[in-house]
Image (cartoon, helix red, strand yellow):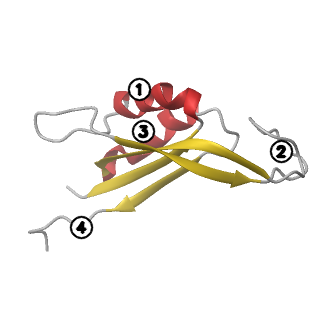
Amino acid sequence: MARLKIEISVPDDHVEKVAAALHASGAGRVGAYERCTSVWRIDGTWQPLPGADPYDGEVGVLQHGAETRIESFCDTDQAAAVLRAVRAAHPYEEPVIHFLPLYEAGED
């Protein structure tokens, strides 16, 4: 089964909620382990455009702020459920959620 790396940028005060949704949807399992993630602080920038409803900041003003990056992984057949769960838990109007293919040694 092909696997995907998941990268999510989230405000610091929503890390636990988003991580819980990520894991409840089946991500982060390796053998006899679950809830496997990496997290670290990042500095994000964004500028809300007219019509946006920003979680933080104001329309037209370039913003800088601390965020947390959550990384985990899932099987490709779990990706749609993971995406729905993370979007439902994430406070941003347009959350940054990346799914990247992983190379698995021994696969053709």
Please say whether residue 89 is visible from this viewpoint.
no
Q: Is residue 65 above or below residue 49?
A: above
- Label 3: state its secondary structure: helix
Give the residue number, with chain letter if any, for mark 4: 103
**Amino acid tagged 4:** Tyr
Picture disc at residue 20? 1
- Label 4: state its secondary structure: loop
Question: How far apart in space, not on screen, are marks 1 and 4 (Cα)?
Answer: 26 Å
- Label 1: state its secondary structure: helix
Q: Residues within 10 Å of mark 4 (few under 14, many from 20)?
A: few
Please say whether residue 93 is visible from this viewpoint.
yes
Mark 3 touching mark 2, by CB under 8 A? no
Question: How far apart in space, not on screen, are marks 4 and 2 (Cα)?
Answer: 37 Å
Left or right of 24, for residue 3: left
Whole-percent x, y for residue 32 in the image = 10, 33
Mark 3 vs mark 4: give the one in front: 4
Which residue corresponds to the image point at 19% horizontal and 55% vertical from the top-left?
1
